[in-house]
Amino acid sequence: MEVKTSLLDDMIGVGDMVLLEPLDEDSFINNLKKRFDHNEVYTYIGSVVISINPYSSLPIYTPEKVEEYRNRNFYELSPHIFALSDEAYRSLRDQDKDQCILITGESGAGKTEASKLVMSYVAAVCGKGAEVNQVKEQLLQSNPVLEGKNLTEYGKYMDIEFDFKGDPLGGVISNYLLEKSRVVKQPRGERNFHIFYQILSGASEEFLCKLKLERDFSRYNYLGLDSAKVDGVDDASNFRTVRNAMQIVGFMDHETQSVFEVVAAVLKLGNIEFKPESRANGLDESKIKDKNELKEICELTGIDQSVLERAFSFRTVEAKQEKVSTTLNVAQAYYARDALAKNLYSRLFSWLVTRINESIKVLKKVMGVLDIYGFEIFEDNSFEQFIINYCNEKLQQIFIELTLKEEQEEYIREGIEWTHIEYFNNAIICDLIENNQTGILAMLDEECLRPGTVTDDTFLEKLNQVCATHQHFESRMSKCSRFLNDTSLPHSCFRIQHYAGKVMYQVEGFVDKNNDLLYRDLSQAMWKASHSLIKALFPEGNPAKINLKRPPTAGSQFKASVATLMKNLQTKNPNYIRCIKPNDKKAAQVFNEALVCHQIRYLGLLENVRVRRAGYAFRQPYEPCLERYKMLCKQTWPHWKGDGVEVLFNELRIPEEEFSFGRSKIFIRNPRTLFKLEDLRKQRLEDLATLIGKIYRGWKCRTRFLLMKRCQIVIASWYRRFAQQKRYEKIKSSAVTVQSYIRGWKVSFPSLWLSLCAEARSRSEKTFQECLAFHMQKYFLEMKNKMPSLSPIDKNWPARPYLFLDSTHKELKRIFHLWRCKKYRDQFTDQQKLIYEEKLEASELFKDKKALYPASVGQPFQGAYLEISENPKYKKLKDAVDEKIIIAEVVNKINRANGKAASRIFLLTKNNVLLADQKSGTIKSEVPLGDVTKVSMSSQNDGFFAVHLKEGSEAASKGDFLLSSDHLIEMATKLYRTTLSQTKQKLNIEISDEYVSCSLKRTFTSVQHAKKSTPPQLSATV
């Protein structure tokens, strides 16, 4: 019997925040901390999963856990990421609903690990097979390949595609905003992308030599030394994992080599340094200090050294048919170097995503997994944080919309009245950022594209003019008078009041980062490379495809990507995982309440709970609800058929405004009602446990008593056996002693002994004879008074009084029975004797052979059923028959041609069998008894019989007769006796359920064709 469970069982804190009471920020954080301290890292907000990174290995992701959550209801077990994964997978497999799992949170909150767990769970529960396993392995190994190239500072959306059976076929990966500025500069306390450290730590000396790299991190300017080594991170092992993953996904050896060559070139670009040099025209020009690094880069990439060197020193600007070449100063040269490094790395990452998609892409029903950065509020927030927070605003908007939509659809589906829910709609913030005319991104693009001097300050001035009156925009120079005295806001900053709180952005770098320009000279230099991968990364460098149109800005590209993502998410059923970082030290069992509170605010978790609780806080299908609480009502406990939830709630007298009945679920408005039910259930379970304990103790005591009773019986029986053995041995010993004395006495007095024995023998024989005579006399006198009746069928007989009279008693019974039978027979007349002889003959012929026989035993054989001699109708027939008629009966003769029955008069005389017409009395057939060879019939309870005639006889020319009569037993018996009397031969009476006569085959066939017009008895016989 399967045990029903629920997340309410053995709950630490509150497993679902919707049930939290009271609901405020402090109780929310305290509940998370309480569960975190007990290694409960997952908590629900309805169908949303909150995941706190434990920074340690927990035994909750084993294959046994996978099987535990497989095909289970979402709320049936304690909160877990596997429950959400299973719910999404089963909805996709069984209901053909495309799914999307949105994983959000800041860096270090465990987003990537959560996406791995989702993918590994789906891989574990879907189908098996060589081809399926290969696809699963490719999907799982796509993560290490991309993780090696980044620090998860990007958004990754992966569509896992499934067939109709729910087996994975492939996938498609999309990436959003790789933080490529990290290549050239990292925030304090953080390091560059993983792959740089992995190559230097895990590659062999030979491989490093091919890449022209050294193992020392300090040799490379792009690598921050303060965070080069991270505790618990094995870069060498991770490098081997990346190479193995690339092989599994389908990268060829030369492709893998090309990827690492590009990575090495990016790393070495940081070592190129410039020095100023004055020209004759008075302009400053930059020159490369050490050309050895440039030479190695050119050898790796297959670029002519002079071409790349010129691209770092000059910039060519084209306008219509004119080309203008200008020199680059040192600052511009460093900008060009860093822009090339960022573009190389960014384009390589995009190429990797495209290359992986080629290996795993198929078009079927999909489950999307979105692993994207969370809301960011730092001390210094720039362009990257601005567009990241814009993406989170859009995700929050779609989350609220889809959550409310899901709630409304469930209410309508269950027949519950939908009431409007008040909530903060962040559409006004999204419009502030993305509006095509007055949005911040539109203003930034307009400032980047306009002629004249463009700086970050001019961009801020434009914002102050356009967005000054917006209620969610603040700046020091704003025309809105209420912020003029806000000294906390610097002059070069603006502030946006996001749904998660106020964020201040530094405008410095906004214009440059939005432009994201790579000089055309560098693009053309890269396209001229003999390295096939690098050449493919810069198609715009082809002189034949020069496009003077300015490339789209980073902001507009990201805005389009976000719009595509939102459109994609709205076509799928969403599932949410909100990841939280418990501390900044990445230490286990450390819960920083301030940090967690900050994340709760910007993730909008309290707002999520309020939206879920605006209607009904808890809902559950009727069957599990009744299964859980049925012990609270006498009418529903222990068994109830049908809908007993209404009976249960009426019995508990819960106020009607606290719950509503849907079509398939019970909706509970207030968590207090649910906790009251849980308290009642807990108390009732304790009472039931006491009752079960009492019954168990009674059963145990009774069982012990029965066992002791059986043991006592066994012991007593063994004791009695022992006592009897002792008594027997004592008696035996006494008998032997007595016998020894007697034998001694016999030897001493032999003659006396003989005389005494003879006298005793004669005396005993005489006594025996007298006793026997007495008992015999008594026996016969008693028998005289106990004699049974003279009826032959009376089987009573007095009991035997003495055993020695057994043979006498049996013989006397036999003689008496023969005598009274003779007395009974002497009473019969000759006619009665004839009748009994016929009955006896019928018994020998048909008893236990024909089912019709028992019904004929009690019927006397009359013979003449038709009064032919007295009825004037049969005068003609009487005159035609001059012999004595033994039997006269109306029978049904079956026509062989069509199976129809015709009435005939059957006459049996001493010498002939005659069939005459019933109406006219005309004789139709006359057969001598000598020509009748056999009479056959079935063993069933019917009156059909066949009269078989001798072949070659005159009567046989028309075939055998198939007749039906209600007096079959009498007719067959009389025919048998008459034939025996006249021919001295026994007539063959055959009783069988199989055809034995070929001459009747055609007749039976005709009978089958005419079943509908044949009497039921005929159909049964056939």
Image (cartoon, helix red, strand yellow):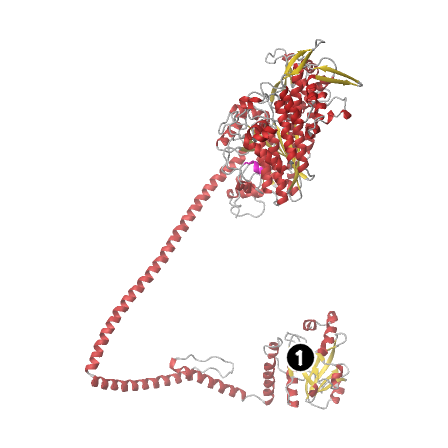
Q: Nearer the viewer, residue 148 or 675?
A: 148
Can residue 225 be seen in this snapshot? Answer: yes
Q: Is residue 81 magenta?
A: yes
- Quarter of the figure that contains the C terminus: bottom right
Q: Main secondary structure of the magenta part?
A: helix
Image coordinates of residue 133 in percent, x first then y, are 61, 42
Q: Is residue 258 magenta?
A: no
Image coordinates of residue 937 in percent, x first then y, are 66, 78
Q: Is residue 776 above or below residue 693?
A: below
Q: Secondary structure at mark 1?
A: strand
Would residue 335 be found to the left or right of residue 706 on screen?
Answer: right
Would residue 694 be found to the left or right of residue 485 on screen?
Answer: left
Image coordinates of residue 33 in percent, x first then y, are 50, 29
The extreme right residue here reads: 321
Magenta-tinted stretch: 79-83
Q: Quadrant of residue 892?
A: bottom right
Q: Is residue 313 above or below residue 104?
A: above
Q: How many marks?
A: 1
Would residue 932 be found to the left or right of residue 752 on screen?
Answer: right
| Residue at position x 58%, y 35% in the image | 116
Q: Mark 1 sits on what residue? A: 936
Can residue 498 be seen in this snapshot? Answer: no
The kind of residue tagged 1 is Ser
- Circle 1 crowding by C-alpha within 10 Å: few under 14, some 14–19, many from 20: many
Q: Nearer the viewer, residue 421 or 393?
A: 393
Q: Is residue 738 above or below residue 121?
A: below
Q: Nearer the viewer, residue 454 or 443?
A: 454
| Residue at position x 68%, y 36% in the image | 358
Q: Quadrant of residue 916?
A: bottom right
Q: Nearer the viewer, residue 204 or 404?
A: 204
Image coordinates of residue 420 in percent, x first then y, are 65, 30
